[in-house]
Amino acid sequence: MTVTLERLMLQLQVDQLNAAYVATLDERRYGDWPAFFVEDARYKVQARENFDRGLPLALIALESRGMMKDRVIGVTQTIFHGPYYMRHVVTPAQVVDDGDGPIRAQSHYAVFRTRPGGLSEVYNVGRYVDEIVRTSDGLKFASRVCVYDSELVLNSLIYPI
Amino acid sequence: MTVTLERLMLQLQVDQLNAAYVATLDERRYGDWPAFFVEDARYKVQARENFDRGLPLALIALESRGMMKDRVIGVTQTIFHGPYYMRHVVTPAQVVDDGDGPIRAQSHYAVFRTRPGGLSEVYNVGRYVDEIVRTSDGLKFASRVCVYDSELVLNSLIYPI
Amino acid sequence: MTVTLERLMLQLQVDQLNAAYVATLDERRYGDWPAFFVEDARYKVQARENFDRGLPLALIALESRGMMKDRVIGVTQTIFHGPYYMRHVVTPAQVVDDGDGPIRAQSHYAVFRTRPGGLSEVYNVGRYVDEIVRTSDGLKFASRVCVYDSELVLNSLIYPI
């Protein structure tokens, strides 16, 4: 791998994007979450079986920032559910920028859930499969697919991953 | 985000500081732990509810390197407890250095505990909220607050996080 | 720590090597796994007690790429076992390159296992202790020891870590 200064800078920007993204979710600033995406971005939470087979079935599938804002309103104001804390641990991203189309990135994540008075537990593990674009406001996701390993627990998945 | 060479170097230094810190703890070199801090540094392990509300209550609150050394002696020589291994997994840090005051950094962590003959289990998850200063001996923590998500298990927290 | 541009580039290369390595395993491309090593590389999966005491006993000990290829065949074609997904979360590496001998690196990892229809669970946590060399085909492992914290569960460890 040839490493240029430009490549180093891109890596830092992608890893900082991921760090800011997960901090926003874990600190429950859900209203700030759609701003990580471009206007017509896609966001999916999908089991790896379906992802690997190219099937459309997904737990969450949003196709614009508007849909993300609706989702946030639903999560914070409408849905009745037991509250829980999330904690994301995300790895340094694999980044490919061939100069043709969006930057492609992938990183592994583990999300831990803590319910009030409860122990922290493994909640959702998988990988982010991303398409990222440069905007005047910095890097944004054009597409983020959260490809998770387990089918279970997720019927109670409320917040974005 | 504008990325300079200086910013790249700072990121590497902060991430290496975190990597060295967790390796020291996980390899049980507790005597080396206070050296990650400046003389009058603060170290706290605090539940996120208390942190978010600005409450002082904390599980551990040390206000100098001397207190840290006392803690290490207590942990390694005095306290009777069941031994366990720790394993920290820590993310690339979010770093802000506005040139005015200490460098501010934040990273997410998961700590796994393994007791003799037992399975590894999720022990403590949360984030490090740090103030870091440059010294002639490299970067040191002026303040590290370990803000954890769960209130449970922690009555048996013996070693620093 | 003095940070040079060369040091920044090395860090990126090592972290990308780790990212590609764990992606290969987690995406079940086991046939690509031996290519992360040089021909006469060593690969070990060893409990920390044995590692710390310098004892040879190890769960897996392979001493060439040929042995790794045999292992892959065994894993994918011969051994009867319940299938499971792995998910590795690995930290930015500590890297030391003193210009004399191989690059030495260490990183912490957590591996989560998901069995069909089951929850994701903590499977194996520990650290990678690595010796890495530069080749015409990029960085390769001359030695990777996976030093894990727990003795349990591992009788069912099938895939490389």
Image: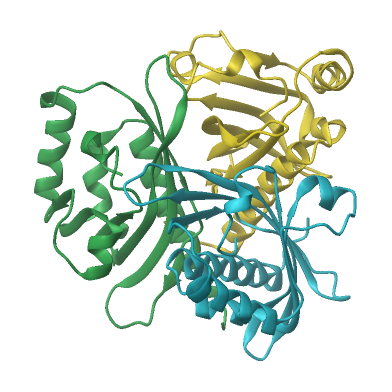
Chain colours: A cyan, B green, C yellow
The C terminus of chain C lies in quadrant: top right
Residue B33 x %, y %: 26, 42
Q: Residue at x 57, y 78 (%)?
A: B3
Task: Confirm whether residue B136 shows in the render.
Answer: no
Closest to the observer, B41 or C23: C23
Residue C34 x %, y %: 81, 30
Closest to the observer, C147 or C55: C147
Q: Residue at x 59, y 71 (%)?
A: A17
The quarter of the displayed image where residue B108 is located: bottom left
Closest to the observer, B59 or A160: A160
Residue A20 x %, y %: 52, 70
User: What is the number of callouts on the image?
Assistant: 0
Above-or-below relation of C130 to A17: above
| B114 sits to left or right of C11 | left
| A111 sits to left or right of C74 | left
Above-or-below relation of C83 to B16: above
Q: Residue at x 17, y 48 (%)?
A: B60
The quarter of the displayed image where residue A102 is located: bottom right
Above-or-below relation of C3 to C115: below
The quarter of the displayed image where residue B23 is located: top left
Residue B38 x %, y %: 20, 58
| A115 sits to left or right of A134 | left
